[in-house]
């Protein structure tokens, strides 16, 4: 009797219909887990990124200690990125911008820069949760995109360790550049957030500049959401990508060439995600196809 009662209760359990773009409604049983547990489940694959970062930091540690090479024998590139920017623009854009906009005080545009810069630390986790709850049929593709971008980008840090503009300036290789990605928090009277960001920067890999994953992540978010949003949102996403690029250059965090390299990595990641999404879709269609007569 208990088995029959259990079977009846399972068969009568409410099922959720999810409408997926371009496909008929899919009936799914409600999750056995609550929203918080589901959120943690959605974010758990991102822990792999932390592992890859830790390995890269270990490989690059000798460069921070003054050694000429990292643990794989790659040398620190200080002049190459600056030369690339100078070849394209006739000057290093970071030096040019700071000579005109930095005067020792924080301004409203520094507040905007701090806010845009900080979005990098929340954009990927927030979109991961959004895709899990609202675009579940694209979740595998999103994970492939994020992990591909992270692994390829971090591999770039290891193979081509490069000094960002602020570090090249400290070494006297380019004109005056300050690292000012956090001073805008003072304008917003949120100095504690600035202190926390600076603490994180102090403990991070200072030669993880090429490619810029700040720029890459912004473009990755825009490209992934592009098919699912309105024209107005697309315009906002495009503006966000450009704003992040300008902020990274202005604040001394990256050269333009770093930003472009980050965009290329994001494009590679989206291509990999599209292939993964096609494989998942084909398997789903095969699974849902009626059995042959």
Image (cartoon, rainbow, N blue to C red):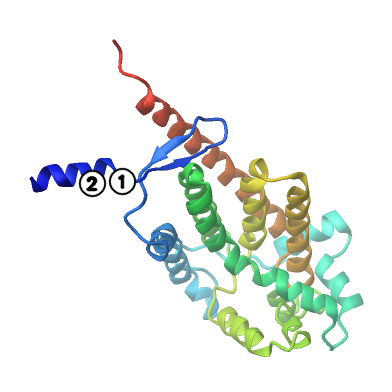
Q: Residue at x 55, y 80 (%)?
A: 66
Quadrant of the image occupied by residue 227: top right
Q: Relative to residue 173, is residue 202 depicted above or below?
A: below
Q: Residue 9's mark?
A: 2
> In the visual, does 35 lie left or right of 209?
left
Q: Which residue is mark 1?
A: 13
Q: Are marks 1 and 2 in contact (CB under 8 Å)?
A: yes
> In the visual, does 272 lie left or right of 221?
left
Q: Residue at x 59, y 74 (%)?
A: 206
Mark 2 residue element: helix
Mark 1 residue element: loop
Q: Residue 244's mark?
A: none
Residue 13: percent from left, percent from top? 31, 46
Q: Quadrant of the C terminus?
A: top left
- Categorize mark 1 by other alpha carbons within 10 Å: few (<14), some (14-19), many (20+): few
Viewer-closest of 121 and 64: 121
Viewer-closest of 166 and 159: 166
- Categorize mark 2 by other alpha carbons within 10 Å: few (<14), some (14-19), many (20+): few
């Amino acid at each position: 009797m208990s088995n029959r009662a259990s079977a009846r209760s399972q068969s009568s359990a409410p099922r959720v219909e999810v409408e997926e773009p371009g496909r008929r409604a899919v009936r799914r049983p409600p999750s056995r887990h609550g929203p918080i547990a589901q959120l943690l489940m959605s974010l758990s694959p991102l822990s792999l990124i932390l592992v890859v970062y830790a390995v890269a930091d270990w490989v690059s540690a000798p460069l921070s200690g003054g050694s000429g090479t990292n643990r794989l024998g790659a040398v620190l590139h200080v002049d190459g990125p600056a030369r690339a920017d100078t070849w394209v623009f006739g000057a290093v854009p970071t030096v040019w911008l700071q000579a005109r906009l930095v005067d020792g005080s924080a301004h409203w545009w520094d507040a905007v820069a701090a806010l845009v810069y900080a979005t990098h630390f929340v954009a990927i986790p927030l979109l991961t949760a959004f895709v899990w709850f609202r675009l579940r049929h694209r979740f595998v593709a999103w994970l492939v995109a994020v992990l591909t971008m992270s692994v390829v980008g971090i591999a770039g840090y290891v193979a081509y360790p490069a000094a960002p503009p602020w570090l090249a300036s400290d070494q006297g290789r380019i004109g005056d550049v300050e690292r000012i990605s956090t001073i805008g928090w003072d304008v917003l009277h949120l100095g504690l957030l600035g202190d926390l960001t600076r603490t994180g920067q102090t403990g991070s890999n200072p030669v993880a500049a090429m490619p810029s994953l700040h720029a890459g992540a912004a473009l990755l978010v825009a490209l992934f959401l592009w098919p699912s949003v309105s024209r107005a949102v697309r315009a906002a996403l495009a503006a966000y990508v450009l704003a992040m690029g300008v902020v990274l250059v202005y604040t001394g965090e990256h050269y333009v060439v770093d930003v472009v390299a980050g965009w290329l990595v994001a494009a590679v990641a989206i291509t990999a995600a599209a292939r993964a999404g096609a494989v998942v879709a084909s398997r789903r269609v095969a699974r849902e196809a009626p059995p042959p007569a």
